[in-house]
């Protein structure tokens, strides 16, 4: 195949998916001696702009995080508008040290439906969006080495590719079964914990400047545009619990105080204190 360009395309509120996709993309580009183009659709204004025009001569590293065992549900409408133009693709999902469940299969299917041809895939364990303990600091140096090794395997596969490949095989519950639905946390009594309407709060005494002159980073980095930039204590939009406003606040002024959220966060940190694996598929 006449590959001419590597494209990295991703949704990455806290930056971990970007790191994984970028590492794969730049290493693969070095191997194939090609240039890399990037499209970051994390922020609302990016999703209002034109999606890249892709061709069969492109290889796309396409990344999304796992939320509740699937792709973020508020992204699905946007993902239904993309077009692959016959390009080859490597679907990438990141997950917060627990499990990627059915997110990789869902992303693979979306790409295949929209004229991408998937040739490899990876589910990478990263720091959890709720926590700075669970998967802390990942992707790290060990992950970087593993991703570089994976990129070399992809490069070798691409150089031998002479025809349109069949969809890459990945584990998961198929679309016909709604990808198994969304993961629902429970307490120790088996009662569901519903955090869908939970929104971040603000320690006003820690916020930079007065609220009228706050730095506004939290509002600027929110992938849903949910935080009011004129009064950052207000969250009129839908919060997807991505952690961007909390992890990117320079003074740690953003926080959650919902008991169910805090219980679930603590439970995850207690149950999954082990090094999550990176799962590759070729």
Image: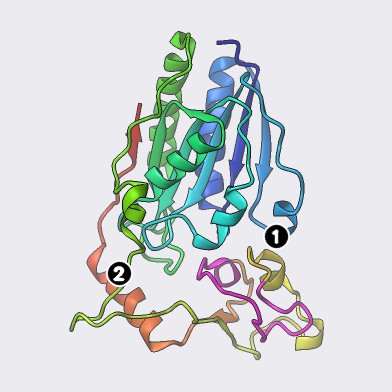
**Magenta stretch: residue 238 in it?**
yes
**Magenta stretch: residue 157 in it?**
no
Q: Is residue 262 visible?
A: yes
Residue 120, given in percent of the width and then of the height, sits at: 41, 29
Residue 32, given in percent of the width and then of the height, sits at: 56, 16
Q: Quadrant of residue 14?
A: bottom right
Q: Quadrant of the N terminus?
A: top right
Of mark 1 and mark 2, the one earlier in the sequence is: 1
Mainly helix, strand or loop, the magenta region?
Answer: loop
> Marks 1 and 2: which is nearer the front?
1
**Please, which colouring scheme is shown?**
rainbow
Asked if the residues shown at circle 1 and circle 2 are in contact, with their CB atoms under 8 angstroms apart, the answer is: no
Q: Quadrant of the C terminus?
A: top left
Q: Which residue is mark 1?
A: 44
Report the disc number at residue 268: 2
Residue 60, given in percent of the width and then of the height, sits at: 57, 31
The magenta segment is 226-247
SS at badge 1 = helix
SS at badge 2 = helix
């Amino acid at each position: 195949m006449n590959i001419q360009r590597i494209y990295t395309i991703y949704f990455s509120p806290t930056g971990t998916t970007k790191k994984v996709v970028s590492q794969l993309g730049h290493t693969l580009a070095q191997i194939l001696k090609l240039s890399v183009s990037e499209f970051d659709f994390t922020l609302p204004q990016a999703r209002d702009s034109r999606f890249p025009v892709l061709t069969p001569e492109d290889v796309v590293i396409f990344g999304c995080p796992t939320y509740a065992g699937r792709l973020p549900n508020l992204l699905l409408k946007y993902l239904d508008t993309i077009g692959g133009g016959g390009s080859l693709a490597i679907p990438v999902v990141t997950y917060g040290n627990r499990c990627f469940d059915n997110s990789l299969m869902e992303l693979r299917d979306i790409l295949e439906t929209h004229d991408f041809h998937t040739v490899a895939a990876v589910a990478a364990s990263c720091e959890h969006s709720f926590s700075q303990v669970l998967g802390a600091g990942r992707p790290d140096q060990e992950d970087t080495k593993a991703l570089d090794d994976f990129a070399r395997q992809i490069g070798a596969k691409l150089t031998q590719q002479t025809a349109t490949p069949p969809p890459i095989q990945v584990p998961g519950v198929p679309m016909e079964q709604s990808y198994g639905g969304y993961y629902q946390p429970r307490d120790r009594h088996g009662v569901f914990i519903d955090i869908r309407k939970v929104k971040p709060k603000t320690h006003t005494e820690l916020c930079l400047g007065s609220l009228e002159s706050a730095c506004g980073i939290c509002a600027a980095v929110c992938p849903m545009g949910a935080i009011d930039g004129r009064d950052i204590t207000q969250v009129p939009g839908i919060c997807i619990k991505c952690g961007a406003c909390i992890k990117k606040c320079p003074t740690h002024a953003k926080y959650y105080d919902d008991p169910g959220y805090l219980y679930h966060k603590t439970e995850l940190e207690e149950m999954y204190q082990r090094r999550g694996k990176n799962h590759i598929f070729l």
